[in-house]
Image (cartoon, grey):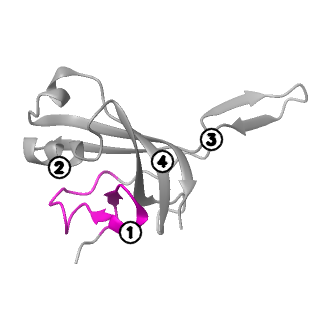
Amino acid sequence: MSDYEYSIGTTVENLQNLEDDLGIPPPHPAPYTEWSAEYTGGDGRVHGDGWPSATWQWDYLSAAHIAALRTYCPGKSANITIRTLEPDLTSYGVYSCVVVWPSGGEYEMGRVSTDFELLFTHLEEAS
């Protein structure tokens, strides 16, 4: 049984735990961001706007780890489902979202990578 609940899948029903099912180490703990943009209104108050997002970041991933993640995002982006850490840093939520594959040749060629990062945008609570 894994220590973390980070999971990825194409639907809620087929979520795969990163550690137990895919053999991928958990990303650094990073909750989702509640909005994609901030702006200051005419009254001086700051407002958040846009969709929530989350980022999973690893210091190191092997070529096999990257290949396993690539199955969920065969192009530059894809619609998927994830279980990720909530802002309280103690509980997890399940979200439908868009995963964005990082740019760069080392990610495209299946090589070992340092500082690998997946961006998940348009998080919407899934049931």
Residue type marked 3 = Trp
> Distance between the Cα atoms at labels 1 and 2?
18 Å
Mark closer to the chain start, 3 or 4: 3
Q: Is residue 15 above or below residue 44?
A: below
Residue type marked 2 = Ala
Q: Residue 19: within the magenta?
A: yes
- What residue would you read off at disc 3? 35
Measured from the top left, where is residue 59 in percent x and y? 21, 42
Mark closer to the chain start, 3 or 2: 3
The structure residue drawn at horizontal position 17% and vertical position 42%, both measured from the top left corner, is 66
Give the image quarter of residue 15. Answer: bottom left
Q: Are marks 3 and 1 in contact (CB under 8 Å)?
A: no
Mark closer to the chain start, 1 or 2: 1
> Distance between the Cα atoms at labels 1 and 4?
15 Å
Residue type marked 4 = Cys
- What residue would you read off at disc 4? 97
For mark 2, give the secondary structure: helix
- What residue would you read off at disc 2? 68
Residue type marked 1 = Glu
> Distance between the Cα atoms at labels 3 and 1?
27 Å
For mark 3, give the secondary structure: loop
Disc nearest the viewer among 3 and 4: 4
Q: Quadrant of the N terminus?
A: bottom left
Give the image quarter of residue 33. Answer: top right
Disc nearest the viewer among 3 and 2: 2
Measured from the top left, where is residue 10 in percent x and y? 36, 55
Label number found at residue 122: none
> Distance between the Cα atoms at labels 4 and 2?
18 Å
Q: Is residue 53 left or right of residue 104?
A: right
> Distance between the Cα atoms at labels 3 and 2?
29 Å
